[in-house]
Image: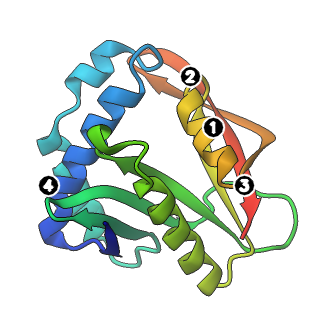
């Protein structure tokens, strides 16, 4: 059984491990292997410490914990892209689960809590971006009520341009 709470400074190393191992498991064959191989927990943790200490930060980080400690992480906040309509839209920036625990409902628990908190902050909808080719994530978010809305953007990884699709749902 997992429970969810706000991430704190003591969780940063574990969250970075979850994120880096998550990328290295989820994006094989999608993101260039050179990029995945160059990712380090130490580098990610340094960036995470820097981001978490920024004044005026509007994002929130939650961790899912079991008896081993953090096993999942979600980061969310105000939508960073232009969205049609006047409604307030939140965004799930990142959601990662320890690769050995995927499929056990931890992602659903974290996403549900992120949705509840966004709704409590007055957001009417949630958006997120998924790399093309990440079919597991696309299926997960579709089961959670998200639908691709036709928007796309490009990201570059080691000189390779990859497309991301935007998904959204009503909260």
Q: Which element type, helix, strand or loop, lies under badge 2?
A: strand
The percent position of residue 100, horizontal first and vertical second, equals 27, 38
Q: Which of label 3 and label 2 is nearer to you?
A: 3
Q: Which of label 4 and label 2 is nearer to you?
A: 4
Q: Which of marks 2 and 1 is nearer the N terminus?
A: 1
Q: Which of marks 1 and 3 is nearer the N terminus?
A: 1
Give the number of callouts.
4
Q: Earlier in the sequence, mark 4 or mark 3?
A: 4
In 3D space, how far apart are the residues under numbered discs 4 and 2 (Cα atoms)?
28 Å
Q: Mark 3, residues whose alpha carbon is within 10 Å: few (<14), some, or many (≥20)? A: few
Q: Which of label 4 and label 1 is nearer to you?
A: 1
Q: Which of marks 4 and 2 is nearer the N terminus?
A: 4
92 w.r.t. 54: above or below:
above
Question: Of residues 103 and 157, which is closer to you in this image?
Answer: 103
Question: Of residues 108 and 51, which is closer to you in this image?
Answer: 108
Indicate which disc residue 162 carries: 2
Name the residue rendered at 32%, 56% in the picture: 72
User: Does residue 63 appear left or right of residue 123 in this picture?
Assistant: left
The percent position of residue 82, horizontal first and vertical second, equals 74, 56
Name the residue rendered at 31%, 67% in the picture: 2
Residue 134, quarter of picture: top right
135 w.r.t. 11: above or below:
above
Indicate which disc residue 72 carries: none
The percent position of residue 38, horizontal first and vertical second, equals 21, 24
Q: Which element type, helix, strand or loop, lies under badge 3?
A: loop
């Amino acid at each position: 059984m997992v429970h969810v709470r706000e991430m704190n400074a003591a969780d940063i190393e574990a969250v970075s491990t979850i994120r880096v191992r998550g990328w290295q498991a989820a994006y094989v064959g999608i993101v260039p292997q050179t990029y995945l191989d160059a990712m380090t927990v130490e580098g990610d943790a340094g960036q995470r410490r820097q981001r978490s200490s920024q004044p005026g930060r509007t994002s929130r980080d939650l961790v899912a914990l079991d008896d081993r400690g953090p096993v999942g992480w979600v980061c969310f906040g105000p939508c960073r892209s232009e969205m049609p309509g006047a409604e307030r839209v939140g965004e799930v920036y990142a959601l990662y689960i320890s690769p050995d625990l995927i499929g056990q409902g931890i992602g659903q628990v974290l996403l549900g809590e992120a949705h509840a908190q966004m709704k409590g902050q007055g957001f009417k909808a949630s958006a997120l971006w998924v790399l093309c080719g990440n079919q597991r994530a696309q299926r997960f978010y579709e089961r959670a009520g998200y639908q691709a809305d036709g928007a796309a953007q490009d990201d570059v990884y080691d000189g390779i341009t990859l497309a991301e699709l935007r998904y959204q749902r009503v909260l």
